[in-house]
Amino acid sequence: MLYQMKLFKGLFQPGTSLYQLQKAEALSGLAPRLLSVYLLSLLFFAISTYYGIGTESYSGAITDSTIAEYEAGKLLLLGGELASSLLYTTLFIWFIAFIFWLMLDISYMKAVIVQMFVFVIHLVGQAITIPVLVFFDLNQLSNPLSFGVIGQYIIDHDFWQHVFGAITLFDLLAISYLYYYLKNLTEKNKYGTLILIVFVYVFIWIITAFMSFLEIPVLVRGWL
């Protein structure tokens, strides 16, 4: 059976998409969808940088910089964000799919397809979050669609507040979709599958928090 890759069908008709994916012996339409995912990721990273989302610590240090340093820093940040977009998208889709292939004994390309479905959820999350942060002049830690606000109330430690800020409602939705697909594509224990998925996301949240926790002005000045 030929599986025709359709990203939104995988989200809005998961039952049909799962059945076709289980029966699939060949895949079609993967390359153009993959390209569109990469381009959208680049676009959202660029927009975030343009509006200073995630670069608040650098913007706050403008008074400590010369005009030349500030402009060079902005270009460096933009280049870094675009490179980060390519790296993040690649690792999220291809490397995490490799982990699922290795641990759950499922087809690697089917795992890639599932990761693309899930990545679209994160892209939709960015498309919604960016206007919210810009309109209400919020930073990522105060994102109302994340647990960052709760984290600021219950934990008095900057790093762990960033960890809570990295956990969004879209992450929880992505985990539910990922679990639905993977538990039906593998013959492994469903609880073990869920634990693996949660472990992967905890790792992502910690890395995301660590990157947000870094002092961007110090890093930028180190390159100037």
Image (cartoon, rainbow, N blue to C red):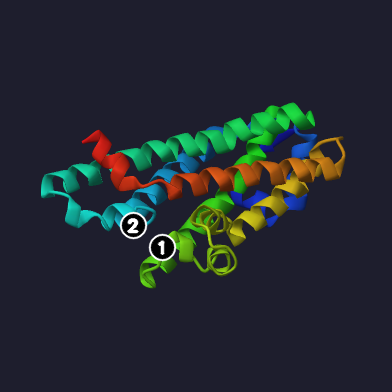
Secondary structure category for the residue under label 1: loop
Where residue 210 sits in the image (x, y, percent)?
49, 45
Give left or right: position of 201 versus 36: right
Q: Which quadrant holds residue 50?
A: bottom left
Do labels 1 and 2 touch, CB within 8 Å?
yes
Residue 60 in picture, x, y percent from top left? 27, 58
The tag on residue 30 is: none
Q: Residue at x 51, y 49 (%)?
A: 209
Distance from disc 1 to disc 2, alpha carbons, whole Å, reads 7 Å
Which label sits on residue 56?
2
Which quarter of the rendered picture does the C terminus lie within? Answer: top left
Q: Nearer the viewer, residue 37 or 220?
A: 220
Decide which of 72, 40 is in the foreground and name it. Answer: 72
Measuring 73% from the left and 26% from the top, which residue is drawn there? 102
Residue at left 79%, top 28%? 105
Asked which secondary structure carries label 2, the reply is: helix
